[in-house]
Image: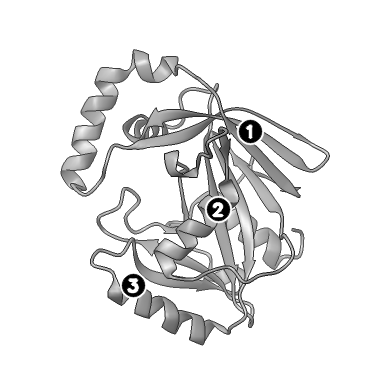
Amino acid sequence: MTGVTLTPARAVAARMVAQDWPWARDNRAAIAAHWERRRAARPAMFNGTVLMLRRWSLADGVLDLDLFEAEFAALLAFKDWGFPDGSVLNVFAAAVPRTRDGAFLLGEMGPQTAAAGRIYFPCGTPDRSDIAPDGRVDLAASALRELREETGLTAPEGPDPGWIVVRDGGLMALLRPVQLAEDEAEVRTRIAAHLAAEAEPELSGIVAVRKAADLDPALMPGFARHYLEAVLAGTA
């Protein structure tokens, strides 16, 4: 996974800015056609407004971000076509739950989702619901909301765990460690009950990682594998 970097940050400061995305505008017709093809296979997908990254800096442990609004259809094409515009990044925050007995928990995406079958930490692209009235974007709240919505879990009270910033090409993943107070078996039972109560759960199952052999290079994205490899090797 050459080119993937992991950098700790003690805080993230994100805000909204006005931004016209020339690449999306110039490729509007191709993006619309791509969306129709993708949606034909996944009719439940919705072309809402998401937030993307225009500018970032990291100084004194604080990651500073400028985010702008874009259509999900444009983001999907941007990812599917290999991140062709180097002026912007796909940014998102992800909770990294770990059980008391040492298992990292990831979710297998459900068949109705854009990433069906892939194995991720609970996460989602930030959207308008993460924007405060003053324009600040709460990415910690975004990560913990996705954790709650996808698994039913909530992060316990405790010291701020900070972040691990993972850069992988056109992607920036902001990983938020969540140390759970229960062992894997108990947490799995809670998650199973949550998924059973959902009419259309976002996840189709839970995958535990305790050792390098548990990593699946075919289904786990590079940012998740690289982070887990580093933690399991004691280098992160």
Helix, strand or loop status at disc 2: helix
Q: Nearer the viewer, residue 1 or 37?
A: 37
Q: Tell me the tag on residue 209.
A: none
Label pair 1/2, CB-CB below 8 angstroms: no
Identity of the residue drawn at 41% across and 62% down: 149
Which of the two marks, 1 or 2, is nearer to us in this view? 2
Q: Is residue 28 left or right of residue 40?
A: right
Q: How many angstroms separate mark 2 from mark 3 (CA)?
A: 21 Å
In terms of sequence position, does the residue under pointer 2 or pointer 3 come before the other? 2
Q: Tell me the tag on residue 65.
A: 1
Identity of the residue drawn at 41% across and 36% down: 50
Q: How many angstroms separate mark 3 from mark 1 (CA)?
A: 33 Å
In terms of sequence position, does the residue under pointer 3 or pointer 1 come before the other? 1
Q: Position of residue 175 (x, y in %)?
A: 61, 53
Q: Position of residue 193 (x, y in %)?
A: 36, 80
Amino acid tagged 3:
Leu
Amino acid tagged 2:
Ala
Helix, strand or loop status at disc 3: helix
Residue 30, above or below 203: above
Q: Tell me the tag on residue 195.
A: 3
Colour convention of the picture: one colour
Residue 36, above or below 225: above
Q: Nearer the viewer, residue 25 or 166?
A: 25
In terms of sequence position, does the residue under pointer 1 or pointer 2 come before the other? 1
Amino acid tagged 1:
Leu
Number of callouts in the render? Answer: 3
Q: Nearer the viewer, residue 211 or 129?
A: 129
Q: Position of residue 136 (x, y in %)?
A: 59, 36
Residue 122 in sight here: no
Q: Is residue 35 left or right of residue 158?
A: left
Q: Tell me the tag on residue 141.
A: 2
